[in-house]
Image (cartoon, grey):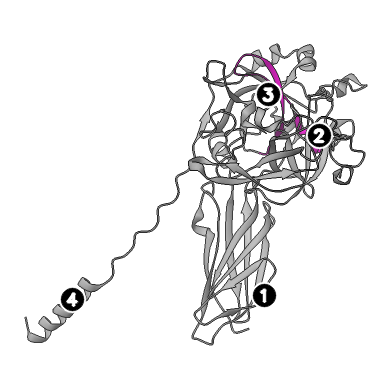
Amino acid sequence: MSRRSTLVALVTVSTALVAPPVEAAAAPPPVPEADVSPAMDPKRAIAYWTARKQFNTDAGSLPENVVIPRAAGGRAGVPGHKRLTPGADVNGYARMPEPYRRSLDSRATGRLYYLDANGRRKSCSGAVVRSARGLLVATAAHCLYGVSRGRRGVWSRNIAFVPAYNPRAEKAADRVPYGVWGARRAWKPARFTGVSPYDWDSIYDVGLVEFAKRGSATLQDRVGGFTPMRSEGGRRTVVSVGYPSDRPYDGTRQLWCLAHTRLWPGHAAGGGVGGRMRTDNCHLFGGNSGGPWLTKDGGMLAGVLTSGASNDAGHGYAVANPLGGESYAAVVRRADPRGVYDALSVQGSGTTRRVTATVTMKGLMAAADVPVVFTLPPGSRAGKTKGCTAEGREVRCSLPLVRPGRPVRVSVPVRIPRTDRPSATVSVASTFLDPDRRDNHDRFRLTSR
């Protein structure tokens, strides 16, 4: 080896020795697990739930920690200035217009019947949700799984669903217009154990039930279904629909309540806190658990009612669990493996004066509060845009809502230094449900005009 080759080799070896180690990419967070019930007999459930049993069934149990007794001499109900529902009663609720077949909100909402962990007849509410199977109903996990007197975790049995249930309708055809549907199986987040109070007030109180077909028709074929909206809670304007059956109600009328929500904490694994939704415009009543909270504009399923408090003026409220990554995403991944959910993609474009991201959602799910991040060339500056904040080269935006098949654009004014063929990147955040995350990131060239 020549002297020059030796020096080159030494320099190369020396450089390799002092180069900083390459950090391994951070491992993705573990995918939350979901549990599935034993197989159920849908025909047995349909045979069990006769019209008389449907009419006379009690509400599903409510956790003691969320039912506040009425104050002595107090005035029960929602204060008048907080009642947003036209024609509302003192608890914030009004009857849904009849017949229920006329609107998706009523048609796809129904009364859910089951035998609880101790074999008692109970009812909740539920909603048909869009899926590849066409057979899924979303409800509260505590309607599907509980703890027996022997402190054993037990799945509910003989689960049946009656969409648009209206036994007091004048016409017989409107009383059970779509029949009784029997369950085949149910799913809940693995972290929901049914133990009160923490599970009842956790972010995991969301479940799904699969119902057998009637003939060749699915539930979704017969009544339609709500588009699930992924979110972690927060401020919304929603329509709460369901079948409250605690006094003064009896579960024979479908009621609704217009509500404004705010972020409300919920227990999470490891002592953490996650997001839920609370409203003071409607009070909680048994039987309404699992009922849908629908976005006022668009009728998407924002969450399911899970807890709250009733019968104490100034203290009553209702809480819903949103369709979050730790709850709904976990169960729908197992319940509907062929369904396409959270399939977000992004494309960037722009000039040295303005950059734009076009975000698209495919499949069955919408997403709220979607983060989009631009990374600009060194020395760049970004102007002000609603919903976006700039820090150094990064511009972080939040899209309020991305629906399937409806691209959303966000555009930011920028000043990019003149360089040879400048480029920028843009990324969008999705969840483990996204079947192909390669299109969550895009690098694009910036033109001069």
Query: Which residue position is annotated with label 1?
Result: 384
**Could you tell which of marks 2 and 3 lies nearer the N-terminus?**
3
The image quadrant of residue 185 is top right
Query: Of discs 3 and 1, which sits in the foreground?
Result: 3
Cα distance between the residues tagged 2 and 3 = 24 Å
Q: Nearer the viewer, residue 318 or 375?
A: 318
Residue beneath disc 4: 14
The amino acid at mark 3 is Ser
Check disc 3 and report the residue beneath it.
61
* Within-10-Å neighbours for mark 1: few <14, some 14–19, many 20+: few
User: Marks 3 and 1: CB-CB under 8 Å?
Assistant: no
Q: Residue at x 49, y 57 (%)?
A: 438
Identify the amino acid type marked 1.
Lys
Residue 203 seen: yes
Q: Which mark is in front, 4 or 3?
A: 3
Q: Which quarter of the figure has residue 355?
A: bottom right
Q: Amino acid at mark 4?
A: Ser
Q: The N terminus appears in which quarter of the rendering?
A: bottom left
The front one of 85 and 272 is 272
Q: Are marks 2 and 3 in contact (CB under 8 Å)?
A: no
Quadrant in which the C terminus appears: bottom right
Q: Nearer the observer, disc 2 or disc 4?
A: 4
Expressed as whole percent of the image width and height from the top left, the position of residue 196 reads: 59, 29
- Marks 4 and 3, how far apart at CA: 71 Å
* Quadrant housing residue 412: bottom right
**Residue interval drawn in magenta:** 104-130
Residue type for callout 2 = Ser
Q: Position of residue 2 (x, y in %)?
A: 7, 84
From this view, report whether residue 181 is shown above or below residue 202.
above
